Image (spheres, rainbow, N blue to C red):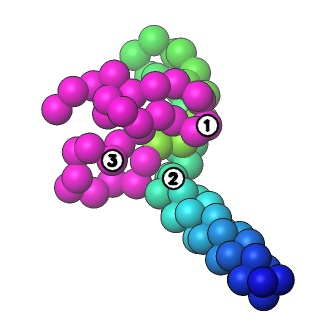
Amino acid sequence: MKKIIVSSLLAVFVLGMFSFVSLAEAAVRVKGYYKPSSGTYVAPSYRSSPNKVKYDNYSSKGNYNPYSGKKGSKGW
């Protein structure tokens, strides 16, 4: 019985590590910059990796941005 419990806990831990890695790979850091037209500074941020799938972006409904904590509001 102990082996089953230990194996289950190990499996949950390993799966949790893989989900963290996939989240880390899904983010792209955007450097801060100045807008030349207004001279306004735009702070650095993170965005989801570019791809052709519209529903996995941080801004899509049902998703959230783990860095800002904001919920997605765009419907495609």
What residue lies at 52% left-to-right and 24% top-to-bottom?
A: 70
Real-space Cα separation, disc 2 to disc 1, in angstroms: 10 Å
What residue does disc 3 label? 56
Instruction: Give the amino acid at mark 1.
Output: Tyr
> Residue 54 in the image: x percent, y percent?
23, 45
Does 68 sit above or below residue 15? above
Dominant secondary structure, magenta? loop
Real-space Cα separation, disc 1 to disc 3, in angstroms: 15 Å
Residue neighbourhood size for the residue with mark 1, other residues' Cα within 10 Å, grouped as few (<14), some (14–19), many (≥20)? few
- Dot 1 and dot 3 residues touching (CB under 8 Å): no
What residue does disc 2 label? 27
> Residue 45 in the image: x percent, y percent?
57, 37
Instruction: Give the amino acid at mark 3.
Output: Asp
What residue does disc 1 label? 67
- Dot 2 and dot 1 residues touching (CB under 8 Å): yes
What residue lies at 33% left-to-right and 47% top-to-bottom?
A: 56
Nearer-N-terminus badge (2/1)? 2
Q: How many labels does the image show?
A: 3
What residue lies at 47% left-to-right and 43% top-to-bottom?
A: 47
Q: Give the range drawn in magenta.
A: 48-76
In-front residue for pair 25/33 = 25
